[in-house]
């Protein structure tokens, strides 16, 4: 079994899991896997801790205006999407929405992210959370 999220190389496996939701998630492994390989693609197959499954069961559907946004692009965020998201949030100039940002200490842009977050008290940085 292979767990992958890049779809940028061949895999010799019987089973491949890619839990990410991207535009072409159903076809992006075409020509990268053996014909016999079974694929588990998309967020339906997300590897989540039990606590998230339990929260999903009791979570109410959101209604009304957005009050909180969660931003998390993984531990390293190679493409610096966290900083981009914060910059775009700042352009919105909204004081009625919280932006909750999750980063890890391995994020090479963490200093810039912390600096940007100081521009708006509604930006909350969470670092090295056990559950993510």
Image (spheres, rainbow, N blue to C red):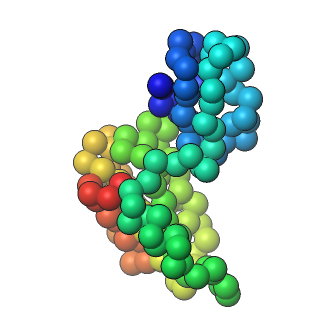
The answer to whether residue 48 of the structure is visible from this angle is yes
Q: Of residues 29 and 51, which is closer to you in this image?
A: 51
The image position of residue 50, as x and y in percent, is 39, 61
Q: How many marks?
A: 0
Identify the residue shown where x is 55% and y is 66%.
89
Q: Of residues 98 and 115, which is closer to you in this image?
A: 98
Rendered view: 22 above or below 124: above
The image position of residue 126, as x and y in percent, is 32, 64
Q: Of residues 70 and 111, which is closer to you in this image?
A: 70
The image position of residue 3, as x and y in percent, is 47, 31
The image position of residue 29, as x and y in percent, is 66, 24
The answer to whether residue 127 of the structure is visible from this angle is no
Rendered view: 31 above or below 42: above
Identify the residue shown where x is 53% and y is 57%.
85
Rendered view: 118 above or below 16: below
Rendered view: 58 above or below 38: below
Q: Quadrant of the C terminus?
A: bottom left
Q: Of residues 26 and 35, which is closer to you in this image?
A: 35
Identify the residue shown where x is 64% and y is 12%.
34
The answer to whether residue 54 is left or right of residue 33 is: left
Identify the residue shown where x is 71% and y is 20%.
30
């Amino acid at each position: 079994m292979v767990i992958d999220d890049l779809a940028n190389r061949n895999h010799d496996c019987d089973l491949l899991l890619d839990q990410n939701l991207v535009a072409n998630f159903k076809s992006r492994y075409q020509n990268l896997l053996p014909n016999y390989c079974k694929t588990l693609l998309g967020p339906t197959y997300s590897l989540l801790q039990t606590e998230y499954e339990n929260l999903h069961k009791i979570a109410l559907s959101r209604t009304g205006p957005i009050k909180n946004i969660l931003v998390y692009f993984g531990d390293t965020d190679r493409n610096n999407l966290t900083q981009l998201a914060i910059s775009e949030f700042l352009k919105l100039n909204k004081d009625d929405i919280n932006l909750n940002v999750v980063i890890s200490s391995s994020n090479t842009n963490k200093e810039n992210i912390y600096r940007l977050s100081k521009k708006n008290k509604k930006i909350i940085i969470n670092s090295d959370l056990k559950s993510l």
